[in-house]
Amino acid sequence: MTRILFVCLGNICRSPMCELYMKDAVERAGLSDRFYIESAATSSEELGNPVYPPAQRKLREHGISALGKTARQITKADYSRFDYIFGMEESNRRSMLRIFGGDPEDKIRLLLDWTPRPGAVADPWYTGDFEATWLDVSEGCDAILRKLNDD
Ligand code: 4NP
């Protein structure tokens, strides 16, 4: 069982899109028993809130429901609960290093690291462009699934 945690600032847009896309992709590939997937926030800003409605709509366009997911914040204990922890951008990595107290087992990556275009995931919070985020999320998650499934 490979345990994956996706992390963004609020856990209402980018990381829940990753969690729910990846659960769907793993299911479609018949690999549900090989992966355990969650998402969480670095900040406490949105604790307990549902997935942001425009992110829910984007997921629903692709047949994915976000019902039931609410935001939670990472804790130091998450570091040992997961094998791979994917942030969306460098600021997420910095916050995780602070909260976890480092990355001694080299678990922290960014979502797009294993794609041909590493860098930050498009942040829809200020732009409202959830399509750009969807494209980054699907490409990043597909690359992660390919790599971890080959390992
Ligand atoms: P997310 O989006 O980190 O992708 O869930 C954001 C959610 C909330 C805020 C910023 C980004 N905020 O400033 O509260």
Image (cartoon, grey):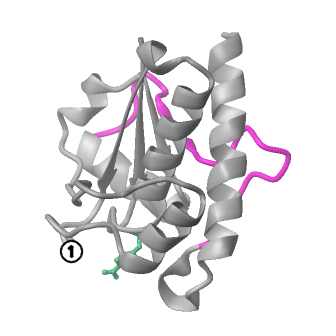
| The CB of the residue at mark 1 lies under 8 Å from ligand 1 | yes
Q: Which residues are magenta?
A: 101-122
In the rendered view, does 66 fall on the left or right side of 91?
A: left
Choose top left, top right, bottom left or bottom right for residue 104.
top left
SS for callout 1: loop
Q: Quadrant of the N terminus?
A: top left
Residue at screen point 36% across, 75% down:
52
Q: Position of residue 139 (x, y in %)?
A: 72, 49
As drawn, is 54 to the left or to the right of 128?
Answer: left
Determine if residue 106 is in view: yes
Crowd rating for badge 1 (residues with CA inside 10 Å; few <14, some 14–19, many 20+): some
- Ligand 1: give its quadrant: bottom left
Relative depth, front residue between 3 and 28: 28
Most foreground residue, 148 or 65: 65
Instruction: Provide residue 100's location: percent of width, then percent of height.
Output: 27, 41
* Residue in the picture at 56% in, 74% down: 123
Residue 135 at what x, y percent from top left?
71, 61
Badge count: 1
Name the amino acid type tagged 1.
Answer: Glu
Q: Is residue 106 magenta?
A: yes
Q: Main secondary structure of the magenta part?
A: loop
Res. 112 visible in picture = no
Residue 119 higher or lower than 37, as above or below: below
For image coordinates 19% across by 39% down, the residue present is: 76
* Residue pictured at 25% horizontal, 49% vertical: 99
Vertically, is 35 above or below 132? Answer: above
Give the image location of residue 114, x and y in percent: 73, 38
In this picture, residue 46 sits left or right of residue 24: left
Say which residue label 1 marks. Answer: 45
Instruction: Locate the C terminus and report the quarter of the image it occupies.
Output: top right
Residue 150 picture quarter: top right
